[in-house]
Image: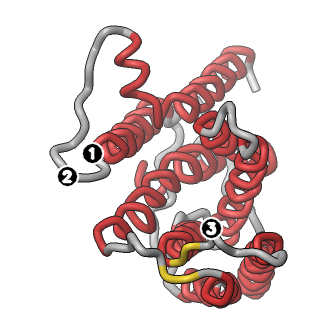
């Protein structure tokens, strides 16, 4: 690769990381500069909805700006919004059933459960996070910038974990949250890669786990159920990855993308 292209690739890589770190903090960054961005006109989730909307807009604009001229793939596909079919996402959804069953046994239906809240916490917010971190943070670097799979996976997962860990800073749970969300980011990325570098399998897994946490109140779970639920989440992830791996292996070609020299 010519030296000029190396500099361009390094610059694009730095900007990808910068966008991932800043995406969910656009309003906070603006406020530190003296610019107030109000939340959306909603009775609930107004601020977090605006945060997620701005994160998605930033990711899309960054993908448009950073896509190399030689890469002719539409930005929507570079962000994982193609449709390879629903067989894989449906199988991923089935793989999360053990966690649902465990949550139902260990906990009780959440007292403050409502469909509107479930829409935000189990669908809209996970979709925004998947588009930003797995779409822009993993699929775009793989297909558009041709990063190695391990590098793309680890960068977005570390950013994903760090953002969630910082929310819990000062709490005893901060390190646990970082580790769990970082691991989750890796699992979502692997599922997306095995499903043809599309968002849907990782999104379904993410949405299903979030929905279970919203539907069931596990705060009173005892007698080791917390550890059992954590282990079941890991088992569900392993099952989902193995199932998609076998499907992908039968189709031929694992985690490969066509190489186009960036310009």
- Report the residue that reaches farthest toward the left: 41
Q: Quarter of the image holding residue 81?
A: bottom left
Using the numbered discs, state the Cα–Cα distance from disc 3 to disc 2 in whole angstroms. 26 Å
- Percent of width and height locating residue 62: 44, 33
Are circles 2 and 1 on residues that touch, CB within 8 Å? yes
Q: Nearer the viewer, mark 3 or mark 2?
A: 3
Q: Quadrant of the N terminus?
A: top right
Residue 219 — which label? Answer: 3
Badge 1 marks a residue whose secondary structure is: helix
Asked if residue 148 can be seen in this view, the reply is: no
Q: CA distance from mark 3 to mark 1?
A: 26 Å
Quarter residue 29 falls in: top left
Q: Nearer the viewer, mark 3 or mark 1?
A: 3
Residue nearest the viewer, comparing 168 with 38: 168
Q: Residue at x 40, y 12 (%)?
A: 32
CA gap between label 2 and label 1 equals 7 Å
Which element is circle 3 on? loop
Residue 170: tell me if it is visible. Answer: yes
* Residue 97 to residue 110: above or below: below
According to the picture, the residue beneath numbered tag 1 turns out to be 46
């Amino acid at each position: 690769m010519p030296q000029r292209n190396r500099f361009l690739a390094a610059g694009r890589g730095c900007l990808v990381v910068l966008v991932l770190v800043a995406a969910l903090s656009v309003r906070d960054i603006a406020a530190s500069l003296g610019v107030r961005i109000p939340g959306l006109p909603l009775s609930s989730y107004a601020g977090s909805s605006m945060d997620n909307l701005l994160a998605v807009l930033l990711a899309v604009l960054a993908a448009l700006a950073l896509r190399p001229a030689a890469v002719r793939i539409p930005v929507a596909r570079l962000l994982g919004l193609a449709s390879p079919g629903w067989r894989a996402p449906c199988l991923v959804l089935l793989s999360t059933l053990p966690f649902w069953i465990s949550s139902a046994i260990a906990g009780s239906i959440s007292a403050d459960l409502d469909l509107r809240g479930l829409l935000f916490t189990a669908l809209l917010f996970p979709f925004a996070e998947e588009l930003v971190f797995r779409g822009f943070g993993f699929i775009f670097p793989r297909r558009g910038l041709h990063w190695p799979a391990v590098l793309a996976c680890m960068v977005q997962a570390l950013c994903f974990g760090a953002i969630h860990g910082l929310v819990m800073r000062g709490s005893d749970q901060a390190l646990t949250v970082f580790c769990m969300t970082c691991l989750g980011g890796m699992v979502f990325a692997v599922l997306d890669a095995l499903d043809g570098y599309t968002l849907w399998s990782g999104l379904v897994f993410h949405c299903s786990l979030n929905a279970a946490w919203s539907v069931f109140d596990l705060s009173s779970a005892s007698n080791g159920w917390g550890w059992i639920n954590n282990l079941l989440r890991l088992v569900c992830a392993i099952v989902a990855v193995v199932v998609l791996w076998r499907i992908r292996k039968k189709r031929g070609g694992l985690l490969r993308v066509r190489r186009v020299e960036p310009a």
